[in-house]
Amino acid sequence: MLKQLTISQLRNIGDLSVQPCSNINLLLGENGSGKTSILEAIHLLTLGRSFRTRSLKNVIRFGEQKFQVTARTETDMPVGLQFDITTGVHIRLNSSPLKKLSDLASQLPLQYISANCHQFFEMGPRFRRQLVDWGVFHVEPSFNFHWQSYKKILQQRNSALKKRKPEAEITLWDEHLAQHGEQINALRIQYLDKLLDDFRLIFTRLCSGYSSAEFSVRYRPGWAKETNLIDSLGVGLERDRKLGYTRTGSHAADWSFKINNADPAEMLSRGQQKLFYLSLSMAQGKSSINSSRDKTILLIDDLSSELDLAHQEGVLSELESLPVQSFITSTEMSLKQIVRPEKDKVFHVKQGQIV
Ligand SMILES: Nc1ncnc2c1ncn2[C@@H]1O[C@H](COP(=O)(O)OP(=O)(O)OP(=O)(O)O)[C@@H](O)[C@H]1O
Ligand SMILES: [Mg+2]
């Protein structure tokens, strides 16, 4: 959670300072006023990258040399990120320089929900894996160890396959790869089962037409379900040698939620698809506070697109009851009448400033 946020020379923002509240922060303003840029600044600060561009140069305000974002977290810890055209990225956590951005990300769980999030159903398995792994990472302390170990071993095995090494130099990695893979698998299954329960409650409140529907998880571990990873690696060895990489394993897992055993993408309207993704993110935010980490931050860009006012109100009221800090942008001025003035905050954004 962020207590205080300062942004300078980023997009159309010159110097901006805000004191967000711990619940809903509504950023209202006209097109091009700088709302998404504020979300982009928070995203940059916590993850070190933008959701709009690969090149940090593009984020710097036209004509300037660097941009900077700083904040204070729930525990009053100062964090900061600066990007300078000549010297590159500088990150600070608690006033000391940081080498690894992942240290910051693990301190501040953050989810960005784009205006086009109804397109979730068109995304590939990689996106879905990242989503579930984000959740497991923030809930289950051992996940990162298994995942990092798995990735390293997989790299070694793939390199042996690519170099056409003898069989023994490839299968040498299998036992450890399988051990970590099975752990990752178990953690993902456990997380998805819990996530489905939280998701179902939120989604059916937002889409009452589905309140008596049946929801289920379909999960594919990345290898044939009836076997285990070690055996699958053995069975797939000749194929892997031909391909030059390992095809089966946790890196090939996939999952989906089904409604009445069918694909939600084929029955939900566009607005409902957006509500589906929002419910998923809110459920993830809810479960990630079970861990000892900081409160989850949700960045919701353009809540109003695809949703009528009643459903926007529904989303806001779900957020009121969740232990997450949200930053929500919209051009819909009437939203300020929906939030609770004693708990939430409304910011009017105009030409890169809060007015
Ligand atoms: N590097 C930059 N330097 C200065 N201004 C920029 C830069 N990049 C983009 N802009 C401008 O910054 C402004 C803010 O853009 P932003 O996407 O934050 O607006 P927004 O409030 O989210 O608008 P919308 O409601 O249309 O989504 C835009 O006018 C954009 O053209
Ligand atoms: Mg925008």
Image (cartoon, rainbow, N blue to C red):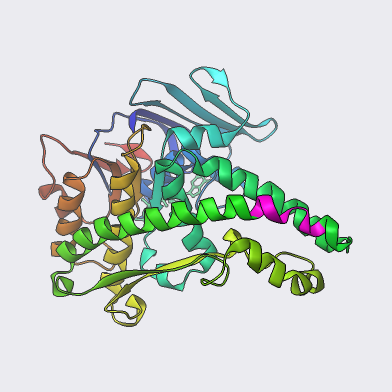
Q: Which of 56 and 140 is in front in this view?
A: 140
Q: In which quarter of the image is the C terminus?
A: top left
**Residue 249 point in image, percent of width and height:** 61, 62
Residue at the spot 35% in from the left edge and 22% down from the top edge: 75
Residue at the spot 34% in from the left edge and 33% down from the top edge: 1
Q: Does the magenta stretch include residue 174?
A: yes
Q: Quadrant of residue 99?
A: top right
Q: Quadrant of residue 232?
A: bottom right
* Residue 52 shows in this picture: no
* Residue 266 shows in this picture: yes
Q: Is the magenta stretch mostly helix, strand or loop?
A: helix
**What is the magenta range?**
170-177
Q: Is residue 27 above or below residue 129?
A: above
Q: Is residue 101 above or below residue 328?
A: above
Q: Is residue 330 above or below residue 347?
A: below
Q: Which of 111 and 84 is in front in this view?
A: 111
Q: Does the magenta stretch include residue 186?
A: no
Q: Which of 336 and 127 is in front in this view?
A: 127
Residue 75 placement, left or right of 321: right
**Residue 178 point in image, percent of width and height:** 63, 55
Residue 300 placement, left or right of 121: left
Residue 100 placement, left or right of 195: right
Q: How many labels does the image show?
A: 0
Q: Which of 308 and 266 is in front in this view?
A: 266
**Residue 315 point in image, percent of width and height:** 20, 56
Residue at the spot 36% in from the left edge and 79% down from the top edge: 263
**Residue 148 point in image, percent of width and height:** 61, 44
